[in-house]
Image: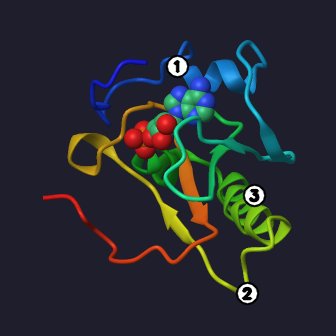
Amino acid sequence: MSVTPVDPTQPYDSDNIFAKILRGEIPSTRVYEDEWAVAFEDIAPVAPIHVLVVPRGAYVSWDDFSQNAPAQEVAGYVKAIGNVARQLGLVEDGYRLINNIGPDGGQIVPHLHVHLLGGRTMGPMLTGQ
Ligand code: AMP
C-alpha cells in the first residue's frame, strides 16, 4: 500500500483500496454493514479492537463528506459508527474514534474512514511528535 499522504483536495479515486473492499474485489473481515456503511477489521491493528468504518458513498475525506454528503447520508454514517461500537460491546468500557484528514492528519487511504479503537485503555490522545 502506498504511504503517500492523501491530498484532501484531490478528486475521488475509485481504485483506492477501500473502494475495492466495498466492491468485494479484495478481502476484508467485515464486522458490520448496513445501507450506509461497512465496517471491517484494520489490517494492522493498534488495539485489541481496531475497526474501520467506511461510508458506502464515494468521499475522499471528512472534509469532502461534511461538505458534499446529503444529510440523510451523514446521519446514516454517524449512526452506523455508533451501531458498530454497540455491536462490539464497547459502550460500557468506552472506545476511541479517530479520523485522519490530509497530510497533517496522517491520512493514507483516500476514502473516508473512522478508526474505532477499543479493548484496552487508550492512554494519552497523542503520542507522536
Ligand atoms: P489512515 O492513515 O487513517 O488513512 O489509515 C488507513 C488504515 O487502513 C491503516 O490503519 C491501515 O492499516 C488500514 N488498511 C490499509 N489497507 C487495508 C486493508 N486492505 N484492509 C484493512 N485495513 C487496511
Mark 3–mark 1 Cα distance, whole angstroms, equals 22 Å
Mark 2–mark 1 contact, CB under 8 Å?
A: no
Q: Nearer the viewer, mark 3 or mark 1?
A: 1
Report the amino acid beneath label 3.
Answer: Gly
The residue furthest left is 129
Mark closest to the chain's N terminus, 2 or 3: 3
Which residue sits at x=74%, y=12%? 25
Q: Residues within 10 Å of mark 1 (few under 14, many from 20)?
A: some
How crowded pointer 3 is (Cα within 10 Å; few <14, some 14-19, many 20+) is rated as some
Report how far apart the C-alphas of labels 2 and 3 lie in the structure.
23 Å
* Count of all numbered marks drawn on residues in the image: 3
Mark 3 or 1 closer to N-term? 1
Look at label 1 and name its amino acid: Asn
- What residue do we see at 56% from left, 21% from top? 17
Let me know if residue 58 appears in the view.
no
The quarter of the image holding the C terminus is: bottom left
- Amino acid type, label 2: Glu
Left or right, 62 with respect to 48, comes to: left
**Does 57 sit above or below residue 85?**
above
Q: Are marks 3 and 1 in contact (CB under 8 Å)?
A: no
For the question of whether residue 86 can be seen, the reply is yes
In the visual, does 113 lie left or right of 34?
A: left
Quadrant in which the N terminus appears: top left
Q: Nearer the viewer, residue 92 or 67?
A: 92
Where does label 1 land, which residue? 16
Residue 41 percent coordinates (x, y) = 68, 43
- The front one of 114 and 77 is 114
Q: Could you say which quadrant of the image residue 80 lies in?
A: bottom right
